[in-house]
Image (spheres, helix red, strand yellow):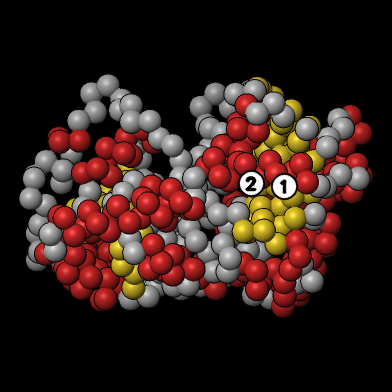
């Protein structure tokens, strides 16, 4: 099949749509990806990419067309709006002309916020009279309210209307979380279109850069530390503040170490909090490391931790981090509500406390720090077994191919 993929982000940015496009191409399909010049999460164009460089390329058999955007910069409100609007405008104009030049059999949308790419995908689907499959990873306009703080009723009403019209055009609506069903069906009678299509974990080859030695990185240089590792984006949604408050409660327990590997909008603010509150002996922000080093960091950790704010759209979400952590066979400690918490409980792979409840989180950390390594390993093994039964990439790619062929 000739498949057109719409996505806000694509390789070398790290999103699940990379796996989808590459696997479909490997299986013999003709895949074209319409996306933006890569700038996430740093807020500036990746090296080798610009308004004039590598706007069209072939990556692992996938035809990639990159459209101009205004980079998101430091993620401030004005720059984000300019980033979203510039991409939507360029994609809308490009899709109009592209729909006459290139014929497709299917349209697939990988939806992270914002929702506007759905409008362009709908236009292509309608013009060419072909099926549209829509993978929802962020609820809209709920994300606009939770992350953007925009609550004006006229804006929300117009966004709901836009979403409903796109969903009406969809052949299938794929959900990364079962909790999305209620929100989607509130916008229209879409129950018969809904398909549960959860995330999976990246397959990461452990090929560390030359000279990388985790034993020389604090706090991994001491053998008796109890290490909680957070790996990934350090943004507003992740509620890093609550994790730091838990660390503050435990700062006299010097062997308990909170380690953050990654980058994002809250990193600098969080590092300042560490200095101002005397946490430099127990909290470490190590910055970004290559994905290939993550298995090494995770093997050295005792517990993998994460959190999300107490917002409706986050409570309905199962973050991809859950599946990634499960696949590594390590116990999980989460500070979240809703679907993600239920999944941790169902898999018996760790513990969760309510979103924002840093006091309970701190107490749970203390409890986990005194149980045996064997008991911790049982939790990790439970998670890996649950992942292998339910969330592998191979299962999802087969499911998607079956859905594409069935339309």
User: Residue 19 location in percent, x, y?
Assistant: 56, 37
Q: Residue 400 falls in which quadrant of the image?
A: top right
Q: Is residue 171 left or right of residue 294?
A: right
x, y percent for residue 342: 44, 70
Q: Does residue 227 appear in this view?
A: yes
Question: Which residue is the site of mark 1?
Answer: 403
Characterize the local packing of mark 1: few (<14), some (14-19) or many (20 or more) Cα atoms within 10 angstroms. Answer: some
Q: Is residue 115 above or below residue 105?
A: below
| Residue closest to the eye, 385 or 174 | 385
Residue to which mark 2 is pinned: 399
Viewer-proximal residue, 85 or 285? 285
Quarter-wise, where is residue 373 in the image? Answer: bottom left
Residue beneath the point at 72% across and 47% down:
403
SS at circle 1 = helix
Looking at the image, which residue is at 66% across and 52% down?
135
Q: Residue at x 11, y 41 (%)?
A: 221
Q: Position of residue 96 (x, y in %)?
A: 87, 40
Q: Is residue 82 left or right of residue 304?
A: right
* Residue 277 visible, this angle: no
Are circles 1 and 2 on residues that touch, CB within 8 Å? yes
**Looking at the image, how many numbered discs can be counted on the residues?**
2
């Amino acid at each position: 099949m000739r498949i057109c993929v719409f996505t806000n982000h694509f390789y070398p940015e790290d999103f699940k749509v990379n796996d989808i496009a590459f696997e479909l191409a490997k299986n013999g399909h003709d895949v074209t990806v319409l996306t933006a010049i890569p700038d996430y999460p740093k807020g500036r164009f990746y090296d080798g990419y610009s308004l004039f460089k590598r706007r069209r390329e072939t990556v692992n058999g996938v035809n990639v067309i990159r459209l101009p955007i205004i980079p998101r910069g430091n993620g401030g409100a004005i720059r984000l709006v300019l980033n979203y609007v510039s991409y939507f405008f360029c994609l809308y104009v490009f899709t109009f002309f592209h729909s006459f030049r290139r014929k497709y059999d299917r349209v697939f949308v990988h939806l992270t916020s914002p929702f506007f790419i759905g409008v362009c995908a709908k236009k292509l689907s309608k013009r060419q009279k072909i099926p549209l499959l829509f993978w929802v990873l962020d609820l809209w306009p709920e994300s606009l309210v939770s992350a953007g703080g925009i609550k004006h009723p006229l804006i929300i009403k117009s966004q709901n209307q836009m979403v409903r019209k796109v969903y009406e055009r969809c052949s299938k609506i794929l959900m990364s979380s079962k909790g999305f069903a209620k929100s989607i069906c509130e916008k229209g009678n879409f129950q018969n279109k809904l398909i549960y299509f959860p995330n999976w974990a990246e397959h990461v080859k452990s090929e560390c850069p030359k000279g990388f030695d985790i034993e020389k990185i604090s706090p991994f240089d001491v053998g008796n530390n109890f290490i909680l590792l957070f790996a990934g984006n350090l943004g507003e949604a992740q509620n890093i503040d609550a994790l730091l408050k838990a660390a503050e409660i435990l700062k006299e327990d010097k062997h308990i170490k909170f380690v953050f590997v990654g980058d994002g909008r809250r990193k600098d603010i969080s590092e300042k909090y560490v200095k101002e509150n005397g946490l430099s002996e127990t909290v470490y922000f190590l910055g970004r490391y290559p994905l290939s080093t993550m298995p090494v960091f995770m093997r050295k950790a005792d517990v993998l931790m994460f959190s999300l704010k107490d917002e409706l759209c986050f409570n309905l979400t199962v973050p991809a981090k859950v599946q990634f952590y499960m696949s590594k066979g390590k116990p999980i400690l989460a500070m979240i509500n809703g679907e993600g918490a239920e999944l941790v409980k169902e898999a018996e792979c760790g513990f969760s406390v309510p979103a924002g409840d840093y006091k309970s989180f701190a107490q749970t950390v203390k409890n986990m720090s005194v149980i045996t390594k064997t008991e911790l390993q049982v939790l990790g093994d439970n998670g890996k077994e649950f992942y292998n039964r339910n969330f592998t990439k191979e299962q999802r790619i087969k499911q998607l191919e079956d859905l594409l062929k069935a339309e």
